[in-house]
Amino acid sequence: MRRTDQTAISTAACRFSSSRELPFCIFAAALILLAASVAPVPAAAPDEFRGMWVTRFEWPDPDPAKAMHTIDTIMSDLAAAHFNAVLFQVRGQADTFYPSPEEPWSPMIAPDGQDPGWDPLAYALQAAHANGLAFHAYINTHVAWQASGQQPPADPNHLYYRHCNAADPDARDWLIHNQGGEPVGFESDNYVWLAPGVPACQAYIRRQVMYVVNHYDVDGVHFDRIRTPGPHYSHDPISSARQAPGSEGNPHNLDFADWTRDQFTRFLRDMTAEILEVKPHVVVSVAPAGLYRQERYPGYPDNFFYGFSKVYQDAQAWLAAGVVDLVIPQIYWADDGRLPGFADILADWVAHTAGRHIAAGQNRRWSLDQLADQVRAAATQGAAGVAMFHYSGFKQKGGFAHFAGSGGVYEQPARPPAMTWKTHPVAGTILGHITAGESGEPVIDAHVIRDGHDDVALSSGDGLFSFLDVPPGTHALTFSKQGRQPVTLASVTVAAGQATRVDVALDAATEQDDATHIEQASIADGQPDAPPLAQPPTWRPMDRDPDRPERPRILLGIGIVLVILAVGAAIARIVATRKELAERRKRDAERDGKPPQPPVT
């Protein structure tokens, strides 16, 4: 029976009842309204991440009107199918889809290299938010160029010509080198790859990301190509010198493989610290290889693509170190009896979340039923959700209707799961820049040690160092660098959910400088100071969805009020009836000459 029919029946029943039955009619109507407010409205699905990758090959067009229309269609499709997050690519090969102060426009949007007259990132961000979608700026980090014909970029100002040109000995200091120390231009997937162990390159990449974070209200930044192209990279001169045993760039004397993995971890730590300082709500996510380490999967062969050993991605270490919020491993296989298997791989990731979130990366090439089963498996195994690669392929095979239709896995809307370490932080962040006292230039590979901890933070190409997940309280930091006077800050205060900035200048050492300088951190030098940009976003995903079950709460409140009124009316009626009976007995007693008797209860 429809809710309107139930209400009509209850109203009619009361209309034709006697006044003495009115309380009971009200009570009955209230019960019917309460049942109607709950039963017919389906509950929303549990919170889960429902992401969609949208690559730079799917939406750009030199014609702004066409590109805008495509963006609008993408966001509308995702919202209608109850997706709640879009991983939208805005930087692919050291060129951009937004007006960058350092990098050129992508030729996909501006073939002549000129300003296209609009900001695709800003437009896509607004369209996503208008449709209730969380917007994650999808950025390739460790590649500088891609061309199927391996031709160099047309723009002479491109990063390629400054640091990644294999043919120019003066412009290849950031380029990967093989085991023989030879520069390698185009490699895996026809990309030109950046060496992860070059501090200046690390600082440059962070600067590009921070431009996006500081100038756009993004909900997250999402990193891909955060790896090497293979196990032989990179033996470039800078990395080799820093990795050498005893080098300041290798404080724990790691071998080449572990040191290379550690470079990515340090990059992400510094990246996350910078984001936490200005916009702590922004989510940091990565898309590593689906297979983590071979020993985690009994019976899996050596020749599979394991992120840990083949390209030096230690994504589970990133989770453990708290340098990322969300990992979306590319588990692009099915459970069809062959290896690799989706369930095997996902189980290992879910077992090593370290309290952060895992969302399973899916590939649209499998059947829609198989993909839907993977969504269910992710929920059953305890993952935070899934992300689909990619939009156009999924749409072409009818994926949106299959997922959001009757009985589909996305039939009901869902919110992205909360990240409690961000909404209710229990630790803080320390970061700052180390510079030379005499010049103000960045000091690279200075050591920073926090009392009571073995880990050593290193200053990067811009002098940045950082510590994450620092317990609230007072901490001592020691700064040292060969050829410079060490400094100890004895009282650095950290508060939960805040970033404490500690900028230090190290003076050149002299023969008389053997003592450690003890200094107290001031408010601007070791005290938490909430930045003006550290504000939560002004919108919330799913606010646009009118089908979320808010009406049952209103109807429930109305029902409760009616029940209270009905009970009150019933009590009043009982009191009036008892009074009427008492008066009647009194009149009867006076007529018969007997004293009045108490009413029977």
Image: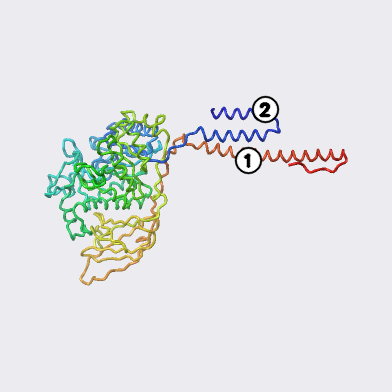
Q: What is the x, y in percent for residue 242?
A: 19, 56
Q: What is the x, y in percent for residue 486?
A: 26, 66
Which numbered disc flags the more N-terminal residue, 2 or 1? 2
Using the image as rendered, state which of residue 547 and residue 219 is in the foreground: 547
Q: Left or right: where does residue 72 sit relative to residue 153?
A: right
Q: Residues within 10 Å of mark 2 (few under 14, many from 20)?
A: few
Q: Compute the Cα span from label 2 to label 1.
A: 22 Å
For the question of whether residue 117 can be seen, the reply is no
Answer with the quarter of the image where residue 252 lies. Answer: bottom left
Which type of secondary structure does the marked residue at label 2 adopt? loop
Using the image as rendered, state which of residue 474 and residue 93 is in the foreground: 474
The kind of residue tagged 2 is Phe
As drawn, the label of residue 525 is none
Q: Residues within 10 Å of mark 1 (few under 14, many from 20)?
A: some
- In the rendered image, the quadrant that contains the C terminus is top right
Which type of secondary structure does the marked residue at label 1 adopt? helix
Answer with the quarter of the image where residue 513 lies. Answer: bottom left
Asked whether the beta carbons under mark 2 and mark 1 sit within 8 Å of each other, the answer is no
- Residue at 21%, 69% in the rendered image: 510
For the question of whether residue 84 can be seen, the reply is yes
Q: Identify the residue at the far bottom of this view.
A: 512
Q: Left or right: where does residue 96 sit relative to residue 82?
A: left
Using the image as rendered, state which of residue 16 and residue 530 is in the foreground: 16
Q: What is the x, y in percent for residue 444?
A: 23, 57
Q: What is the x, y in percent for residue 218?
A: 36, 43
- In the rendered image, the quadrant that contains the N terminus is top right
The kind of residue tagged 1 is Ile
Answer with the quarter of the image where residue 595 lies. Answer: top right
Q: Which residue is mark 1?
A: 564
As drawn, the label of residue 16 is 2
